[in-house]
Image (cartoon, rainbow, N blue to C red):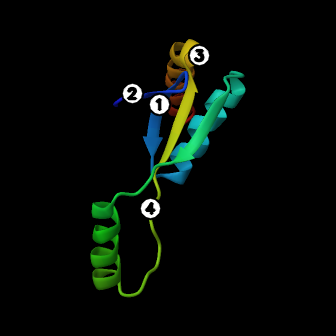
Amino acid sequence: MKYIQDNGKIKLCETDNMDHLVRLTQALNENNIPYETRLKKATFINNLFFLIFYHTFASGIDHKNETTCIYVLEKDFDAAKKAIVNYRETVRKSL
């Protein structure tokens, strides 16, 4: 993971999987850790790949994976990482 500081907030993670995003935000909510989600801006290369791959090979399926980034305050970063690890362990034990 690459962490980028932005206005006192640090990128905790990014994902293009909605289930994963829900689990991450649920873990943060359960631990009362404030966070912000933002859609990652697409680049020209990403848009070009999407146009070529999906419209050529996906036979008309029009869906686009959007990457969402989760940011937390710098002071909450360690607690957020710990909350996510604990949440993952809890989920694994329940399976």
Residue 83 in the image: x percent, y percent?
A: 57, 21
Would you name the residue on which mark 1 appears?
11
Would you name the residue on which mark 3 appears?
76
- Between the residue at mark 4 and the residue at mark 2, the CA separation in whole angstroms equals 21 Å
Would you name the residue on which mark 4 appears?
65
Q: Earlier in the sequence, mark 4 or mark 1?
A: 1
Residue nearest the viewer, comparing 86 with 15: 15
Instruction: Using the rendered view, name the quadrant where residue 44 is placed.
Output: bottom left
Quadrant the N terminus occupies = top left
Q: Are marks 1 and 3 in contact (CB under 8 Å)?
A: no
Secondary structure at badge 2 equals loop
Which residue corresponds to the image point at 45% horizontal and 34% vertical from the top-left?
Answer: 13
Question: For the residue marked with disc 4, what is the amino acid?
Answer: Asn
Q: Are marks 2 and 1 in contact (CB under 8 Å)?
A: yes
Secondary structure at badge 4 equals loop
Residue nearest the viewer, comparing 27 with 79: 79
Q: Are marks 2 and 3 in contact (CB under 8 Å)?
A: no
Q: Earlier in the sequence, mark 2 or mark 3?
A: 2
Residue 75 in the image: x percent, y percent?
A: 57, 12
Q: Are marks 4 and 1 in contact (CB under 8 Å)?
A: no
Question: For the residue marked with disc 3, what is the amino acid?
Answer: Asp
Left or right: residue 92 versus residue 28 is left
Residue 42 in the image: x percent, y percent?
A: 40, 57
Q: Earlier in the sequence, mark 1 or mark 3?
A: 1
Q: Earlier in the sequence, mark 2 or mark 1?
A: 2
Residue nearest the viewer, comparing 10 with 29: 10
Secondary structure at badge 3 equals helix
- Between the residue at mark 2 and the residue at mark 1, the CA separation in whole angstroms equals 5 Å
- Between the residue at mark 4 and the residue at mark 3, the CA separation in whole angstroms equals 28 Å
Question: For the residue marked with disc 2, what is the amino acid?
Answer: Tyr
Which label was assigned to residue 3?
2
Instruction: Using the rendered view, name the quadrant where residue 25 is placed.
Output: top right
